[in-house]
Structure formats: structure tokens, C-alpha cells
Image (cartoon, rainbow, N blue to C red):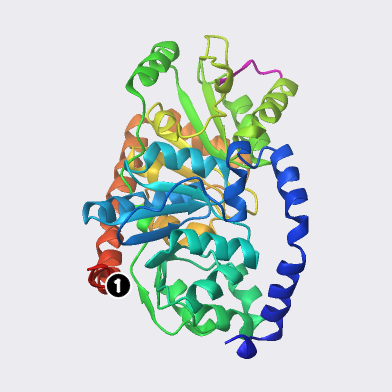
Amino acid sequence: MAERLPATLRAYRRLAAVAMPLAPLLLRERLRRGKENPERMEERRGQSRVHRPHGPLVWVHGASVGEITAIVPLVERLCARGFNVLVTSGTTTSAELALKRLPPGVIHQFFPLDAPRFVKRFLDHWRPGLALIAESELWPNMIMESAARGIPLVLVNGRLSERSFSRWRKAPATIQALLERFDLCLTQSAHDADRYSELGAPRVTMTGNLKLDVPAPPADSVKLAAIQRALDRRPIIVAASTHPGEESAVIDAHLRLRDHFRGLLTIMVPRHPERGPGVVSIADVAGLPTAMRSRGDLPERRTEIYVADTIGELGLMYRLTPIVFMGGSLVRHGGQNPIEAAKLGSAILHGPHVWNFADIYSALDAARGAEEVEDAARLSSRLGAWLGDPRLRERIAEAALETVEVLGGALDRTLSAVEPYLMQLRLEHR
């Protein structure tokens, strides 16, 4: 098969092999930046201290927090059918989430660096009978080595942004060589299906977005009660999964509204928790009293900006407020997932840059379960309107919840599509 590879993939494989001696340097630098778990570094080299369980093993991979969240119900269903499941991801935050959310008995490992020797170690150890790859994780060496071993590859919850699609169209032979190794591509939307088909995926089916079938995120009841007592019915706004540049806009909106809504508290949840101190600095410059959740703080009466720089507590924050601004949308990031907020009764505001969840935001906006704002001035205007009109925001929240419920069903469709592979895996084991 190697001689049929396009030149780009042959060059990638050679470069990855030659660069392997640099892997320790890369991992040390990532460790220094807090992007690696020091106790599990060997997993990045394809090694593991965990024994492979006996019986058929399904390998499910998701890049980061969003993908892991989406695949949890799928993993639960696989476990209920008696399959051993290995879940891999690439970030420390997703690993922490996996430990909290995955069913007992499911193994989590860090995804190895995409170098031939590391990939072979990983596959030699785990010997998966089926690989389910979430969204758009196309690592060439892992894909080619898995296909060469006869491991069925299924892309689940596949999506392809316009930006990625345009980029891949410039290397048609490369992307086709990767996609043709997938047995099946299951996509979130018809647009995604069309893009994968055009790029060379041989078998594509639109099954919908698994994130719509994820239950509302949990919240620790003791912690929720403690923070509710501290808030004492104050008016609250949550800015969820914010990115650099958005915190300033949200703080500007807070400054415009604070005199009109006595005791107003804005809860800021940065997309990357390590940015918490930076968010506090922005609020300090604006002269706003802050508290940080990572330090164990609860908001006091004088606190105006509460920085929730922790992992896995969005479910708690959504339960505190009827109004959520979804981050990653005022800046050119592509928008963060609004589904969890909608399921927990929030009226949703978002910026114009939401291509990561374009179909969902379009449906929410059309149903008046969410509203787009283009800048800080418009953000403060709509926040003020919703804070001052409880019935309006209740109608918006109800429309949001109804919309995400109607759009569900991807989990059942995905399981139906992969059922033949699961049957074959079970038969081979017997």
C-alpha cells in the first residue's frame, strides 16, 4: 500500500520517523506548559501500565473535552452490550473529564504522538477490533497503520468546517488517501456529509450530532447549595467558555449594566482554566472586585466578577442563571457548544462566529431560543433586556430546550450504523 501513497503522506511518514528523537523535547516542553500529565508520559509514546482486557475491545477516540463529552453516551451503550472499551484523548482537561464521566471499567489513555513506532506500540498492546474516531481527528500514521492491520475505522459525529474543507481541497490526493481507509463516515449534518463525500470518503451517512443526545451536565448538590446560599438571589449572568478578547467585552457589558441591576454578578468561565488569573487581571483593571473558584473562593456580596476557572463545573454554573453568553463566538474561533446551556433552561446569547455549531445555532436562532449579538454594545443591550424581563427570557429558554430535544436522535442512528461492525467483532471473538 505504501507505494500508492501520495508524496505528501510519504514525506509525512518519513518526517515523523526522523523526528522521533525530538519527542522527549516536545513532551518536556508540553509538560512545562501544563499540557501533559507527568505520571502518564509513557502513554504519549504508545506504552501503557494498564493490561488489555480479555475479549473484544472497541477503541473510541476524541480529541478534547467537547468530543469526550459527546461520546460518553455512546461508550455507555457499548459497555451495556458487554464490550470492553478503550477511550483515548489528547488533552489533560479531557482526561480529567473522562475520569469523572466515563462508566466504571472503561480504560482511558492518552493518544500517542503520531510517530510510526509509537503508533505500532499502541496498536500492538491494545489490539482493538473496531476504532470509532470522533469528529475530525485525522492522524495519518494512526489511520494508515490501523487500516493496514484490518481494524475497521468508523468516523462518528464527523464534522468538517468550511475552513478545514477549503484547506483539504488544496491537497485532494492526501485527504482522499486518508478518508478511503475509513469503512464508514457518520456525520453531524448534511453539509458535513457533502464535504466528506467530495473529499473522497467512499461511504458517508448523516446521523446527526451526538452532542444533542448528551444528558445535561451534572452538578455536585453540596457545591450547588453552597454557592446558591452565597449568591442570595442576586441577578446573574454566565459567560461560558470564553476566549481571549471576549472577557473584555463581557466586562464592558457588566460595567454598563451594574448601575441598573443592583448586586449584578457576572460569572466568567474561561474555555481554558489556566487563563483564570488573566481574566482576574482584566477585571482588576476595570476596578471590579473578583473571586476565583480555583482558590476555593465563593462570591461575596462585594464580588462582581466570579472567575470559575475549574474543570467540569459548567453544569453547576448553568444552574445558577437563566442567561448565558456562549463564548468563542465574538472572536473568530467558531463558537462553543450551546446544547448543555439549552438543556439546563438558559436563554442564550452568542456572537456571529459560530461555524463549529452552525446548524444548531441556526435552529436555535430560528426558534428564538437564542439571539446573535455582534459586539459588546449589543451584548449589554440584550443582557439588560433579558435581565429586566423574566417572562421574555423564560420564553427564550423554553424555545431553546424544545429545539435541542427535537434535534436529538443521533445516538440511536449512530449505534444502528455501527451495529454490523459490533456483530462482526462479537462473532470473531467467539
Image spot of residue 34 (x, y percent): 67, 37
- Identify the image quadrant of the N terminus: bottom right
Magenta stretch in the rendered image: 287-292
Image spot of residue 403 (x, y percent): 31, 53
User: How many discs appear?
Assistant: 1
The magenta stretch spans residue 45: no
Where 284 sits versus 197, above or below? above
Q: Residue at x 45, y 31 (%)?
A: 313
Q: Mark 1 points at which residue?
A: 421
Q: Which residue lies furthest to the bottom in this view?
A: 4
Q: Residue at x 34, y 47 (%)?
A: 400
Q: Hey, which quadrant is residue 174 in on the image? A: bottom right
* Residue 374 visible within the image: no
The magenta stretch spans residue 290: yes
Q: Which residue is drawn at 33% across and 53% down?
A: 75
Q: Which residue lies furthest to the top in this view?
A: 301
| Label 1: which secondary element | helix
